[in-house]
Amino acid sequence: MNPIQTLWFYFSSYPFVRYAFVVGLLISLCASLLGVTLVLKRFSFIGDGLSHVAFGAMAVATVANLTNQMVIVLPVTMLSAILLLRTGQNTRIKGDAAVAMISVGALAVGYMLINVFSKSANIAGDVCSTLFGSISILTLKASDVWLCVVLSVIVIVLFLAFYHKIFAVTFDESFAAATGMKTNAYNLLIAVITAMIIVLAMNLVGSLLISALIIFPALSAMRLFRSFRSVIVCSAVISVICAAVGIILSILCSTPVGSTIVCADIVVFFGFSIAARLTGRTE
């Protein structure tokens, strides 16, 4: 057994490493499932906007000294997802403008609250950790892991239960509406599930890197595959593998967990792009 393997087996004997793996892989799986739909519907900007909203909500929870920040972060992010969807349908305020208003506003208010009311001696470090991820994924408690498991199961069950509806809304929303399908309701479902994924991913990659976790696996899979199901399966496999590799490398090399996972996603994306060119599958 080489030194790297010995070191890894040594680390994996600790519960916090196993917790990080469970949470990291579940979050990556959930993000990859919705990522394909968000990219195809050009809703990927919503993920970026909601991540900023989640940062603002987390700032409020931090200032209020709440031990369980999910009490504020999850409902606020879900409400913002609904608001973004409704506002984006307003002809006077286009979708991209609505996302810009809500996301930038939440980011500014959150940063102001932390600076004005926070009692922490290292405000810059706290903000940086929240935006870009930190070692919090390696300091999870059993209760945090169970919460992630429950929310992840809800996301996966909802996606599988409404798979055909999501497929219809993704590829031809106008036709789906003409057949009598309640497209607004399913768009709302997609937005709410996305909000849940954003909140789950905050501890893994930070609020500014969440979009990468959603978008890169989907784009990589689209380089080589064309069918919706094939792209989703490939995206899920890519996302889970990159998360596992990123967590392992971050522990062994003492690098930021979120950034390491995103870098692994970027490497895979370029690899798939090269493979697509070699196989003549470029558009």
Image (cartoon, rainbow, N blue to C red):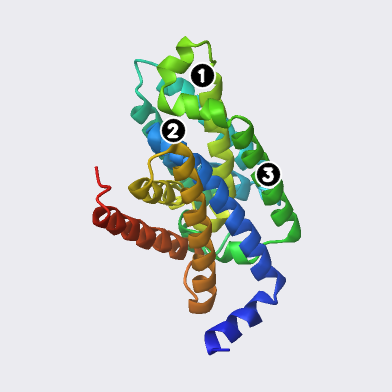
Residue neighbourhood size for the residue with mark 2, other residues' Cα within 10 Å, grouped as few (<14), some (14–19), many (≥20)? some
Inter-mark Cα distance, 1 to 3: 24 Å
Q: Which residue does the numbered mark 2 point to in the structure image?
A: 102
Foreground residue, 120 or 263?
A: 263
Residue 183 to residue 199: above or below? above
Q: Which residue does the numbered mark 3 point to in the structure image?
A: 153
Q: Secondary structure at mark 3?
A: helix
Q: Amino acid at mark 2?
A: Ile
| Quadrant containing the C terminus in the rendered view | top left
Residue ID at (44%, 44%): 231
Tell me the tag on residue 184. 1
In the rendered image, residue 156, in percent from the top left (x then y), is placed at: 63, 41
Q: Earlier in the sequence, mark 1 or mark 2?
A: 2
Tell me the tag on residue 59. none
In the rendered image, residue 8, in percent from the top left (x then y), is placed at: 59, 79
Inter-mark Cα distance, 3 to 2: 29 Å
Foreground residue, 115 or 243?
A: 243
Q: Amino acid at mark 1?
A: Asn
Q: Secondary structure at mark 1?
A: helix
Q: Is residue 243 left or right of residue 279?
A: right
In the rendered image, residue 255, in percent from the top left (x then y), is placed at: 47, 72
Residue neighbourhood size for the residue with mark 3, other residues' Cα within 10 Å, grouped as few (<14), some (14–19), many (≥20)? some
Residue 173 makes an appearance in the image: yes
Q: Is residue 5 left or right of residue 108?
A: right
Residue neighbourhood size for the residue with mark 1, other residues' Cα within 10 Å, grouped as few (<14), some (14–19), many (≥20)? some
Residue 99 to residue 20: above or below? above
Inter-mark Cα distance, 1 to 2: 21 Å
Residue 66 makes an appearance in the image: no
Q: Is residue 120 left or right of residue 131?
A: right
Residue ID at (53%, 57%): 240
Label 1–label 3 contact, CB within 8 A? no
Q: Amino acid at mark 3?
A: Val
